[in-house]
């Protein structure tokens, strides 16, 4: 979106990225800006060398005469010596003689058929910003992303600890696939084949819910509810739904929601490739009529002629407040979650095949949007951030869902965005990427067009859709609501309604009154200034993640427990133990 922004916003973005990427060059210069553009978002893989992926080739060694003879060190002798080995010690080494041949694995390398991925900006290494201690990359992203969300609030977290009971916080975060690089589950699986030992960290740090655990233990120090609801590519919305249900029920007042995923590894890419899911270089070149290599920047082409999706790494976190707390503290309000709907597909022909559940989730989200915003606003002042994976199947099935429901609800030309065109498919955090794009529309007044495509594919259902390959200016108040759609592997469907900040302001005024909103606005000045100070510090390259390892650890003896409450040191409000009977009708 950088070219659509005003000069100051664009300059601020370049300066922020230059600091993130540890560049010493002037971010106002054209050469620096070109470098930043070329080394962010979807591009040729830099996390590893896609032309030299290590693997083990199976070979059969045959003797040139009657026997095969070789020498090895004593420590290299297998614990279980094969029965056909004749081993003799000679001069401190072992000589092995085998009659016949033997199977062996030798180190080799291969060239990846996929060279595109959405990656962190080049030069940004979260591992170096705190004591990572062999953390998997996904957990490094968790620490950085969660810390950034906390510090961007403009409200000190200790203020929340003073006003909100410990059990009224919650954290919902996870990764769809766990941490599969070598420092996580990948190392558990690979170590034996590489002649290495499994470490004590690899298995536990590979668990899917570990991002939530890290946030609670090292960023927030939370005693509240926690967990990770996994729904493949719909995981972010699953956790968002958990958060808003907690708040609307009154059980929680502050909920930390988000996901982290770092799947850009040779093994995961090869796994998805063999499923036929990824955009391979050869197919991309065929689409473009090229022989000189794939256009990595345009690997993702939602709703156009395409050939597969592109994996990405990401961490996306948001903080949810109940409305009373937001008004009281003067919190910056970027929007509100109207509702999130989740439905399965019913009986299926195959696990990855699409079903009808997404028709249900989208119809219900649109119906609640109509109830909140009204018929006219739904028809003319909403748009949708589509799942938009860039697979031939998705372009047909998802476009049919959106198009048919646009007809049902009387929308003549429903604008469709697909942010994966720029950032790729980050799996669990993917809907968070879509949410970020929606919040950007209300901040800057633009809906991102799908600029990686030349045209809409002929098999896309678009009679009532507006799919543009240019950015669309709508103004900060031009959209009252937006929808996020997610379609996860296995039939995990979710659709969310997000309400614009100007709509939320009107709703809050009706509920709390003008005087309360005026007080909120006055307090928000300080909040905005504090958040701006943090942003400026980050742009100067001075910011660091929150990582409180071993700090503020409590023991049971530190708690003051009575039959009616638990007082926790460091928290301003006690945990209430005067709990009502949840089953009064059965008493």
Image (tube, rainbow, N blue to C red):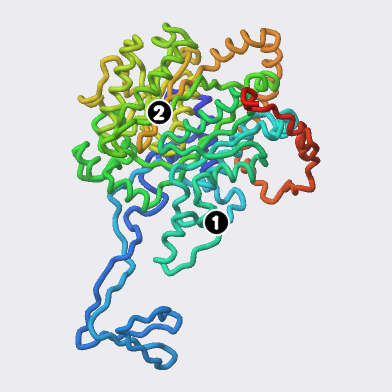
For the residue pair 382 and 410, the one nearer the viewer reads as 410
Split into 4 quadrants, where in the image is the N terminus? top left
For the residue pair 67 and 479, the one nearer the viewer reads as 67
- Within-10-Å neighbours for mark 2: few <14, some 14–19, many 20+: some
For the residue pair 73 and 119, the one nearer the viewer reads as 73
Is 241 situated above or below 499? below
Residue 94 in the image: x percent, y percent?
Answer: 39, 88
Q: Residue at x 37, y 49 (%)?
A: 268
Q: Earlier in the sequence, mark 2 or mark 1?
A: 1
Residue 235 in the image: x percent, y percent?
Answer: 45, 36
Q: Which residue is the site of mark 1?
A: 134
Q: Residue at x 73, y 30 (%)?
A: 159
- Within-10-Å neighbours for mark 1: few <14, some 14–19, many 20+: some
For the residue pair 297 and 242, the one nearer the viewer reads as 242
Q: Residue furthest front?
A: 587
- Quadrant location of residue 424? top left
Q: Which residue is the site of mark 2?
A: 343
Q: Is residue 245 left or right of residue 73?
A: right
Q: Residue at x 60, y 24 (%)?
A: 249
- Quadrant location of residue 75? bottom left
């Amino acid at each position: 979106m950088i070219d659509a922004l005003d000069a100051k916003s664009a300059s601020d973005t370049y300066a922020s990225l230059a600091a993130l990427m540890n560049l010493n060059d002037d971010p106002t210069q054209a050469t620096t800006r070109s470098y930043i553009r070329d080394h962010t978002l979807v591009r040729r893989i830099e996390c590893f060398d896609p032309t030299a992926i290590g693997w083990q080739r199976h070979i059969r060694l045959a003797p040139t005469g009657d026997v095969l003879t070789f020498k090895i060190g004593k420590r290299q002798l297998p614990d279980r010596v094969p029965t056909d080995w004749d081993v003799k010690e000679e001069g401190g080494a072992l000589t092995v003689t085998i009659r016949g041949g033997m199977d062996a694995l030798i180190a080799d390398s291969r060239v990846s058929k996929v060279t595109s991925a959405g990656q962190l900006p080049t030069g940004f290494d979260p591992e170096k910003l705190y004591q990572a201690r062999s953390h998997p990359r996904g957990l490094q992203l968790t620490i950085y992303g969660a810390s950034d969300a906390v510090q961007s609030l403009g409200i000190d977290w200790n203020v929340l600890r003073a006003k909100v009971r410990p059990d009224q916080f919650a954290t919902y975060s996870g990764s769809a696939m766990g941490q599969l690089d070598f420092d996580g589950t990948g190392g558990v699986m690979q170590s034996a084949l590489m002649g290495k030992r499994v470490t004590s960290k690899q298995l536990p740090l590979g668990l899917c819910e570990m991002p939530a655990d890290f946030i609670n233990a090292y960023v927030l120090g939370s005693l509240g509810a926690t967990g990770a609801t996994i729904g493949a590519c719909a995981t972010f919305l699953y956790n968002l739904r958990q958060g808003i249900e907690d708040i609307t029920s009154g059980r929680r007042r502050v909920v930390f929601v988000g996901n982290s995923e770092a799947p850009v590894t040779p093994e995961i890419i090869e796994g998805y490739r063999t499923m036929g899911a990824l955009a391979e270089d050869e197919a991309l070149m065929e689409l473009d009529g090229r022989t000189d290599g794939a256009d990595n920047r345009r690997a993702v082409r939602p709703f156009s002629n395409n050939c597969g999706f592109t994996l990405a790494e990401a961490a996306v976190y948001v903080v949810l407040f109940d409305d009373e707390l937001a008004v009281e503290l003067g919190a910056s309000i970027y929007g509100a979650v109207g509702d999130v709907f989740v439905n399965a597909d019913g009986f299926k022909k195959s696990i990855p095949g699409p079903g009808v559940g997404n028709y249900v989730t989208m119809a219900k989200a649109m119906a609640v949007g109509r109830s909140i915003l009204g018929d006219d606003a739904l028809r003319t002042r909403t748009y949708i951030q589509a799942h938009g994976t860039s697979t031939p199947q998705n372009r047909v099935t998802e476009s049919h869902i959106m198009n048919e429901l646009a007809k049902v609800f009387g929308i003549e030309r429903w604008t469709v965005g697909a942010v994966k065109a720029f950032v790729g498919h980050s799996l669990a955090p993917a809907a968070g990427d879509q949410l970020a794009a929606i919040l950007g529309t209300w901040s800057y007044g633009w809906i991102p067009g799908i600029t990686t495509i030349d045209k809409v594919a002929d098999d896309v259902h678009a009679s009532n859709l507006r799919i543009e390959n240019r950015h669309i200016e709508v103004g900060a108040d031009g959209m009252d609501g937006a929808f996020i759609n997610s379609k996860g592997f296995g039939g995990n469907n979710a659709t969310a309604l997000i309400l614009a900040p100007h709509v939320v302001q009107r709703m809050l005024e009706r509920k709390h009154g003008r005087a309360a909103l005026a007080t909120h606005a006055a307090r928000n000045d300080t909040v905005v200034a504090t958040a701006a100070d943090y942003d400026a510090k980050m742009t100067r390259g001075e910011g660091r993640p929150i990582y409180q390892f071993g700090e503020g650890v409590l023991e049971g003896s530190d708690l003051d427990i009575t039959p009616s409450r638990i007082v926790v040191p460091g928290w301003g409000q006690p945990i209430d133990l005067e709990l009502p009977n949840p089953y009064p009708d059965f008493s």
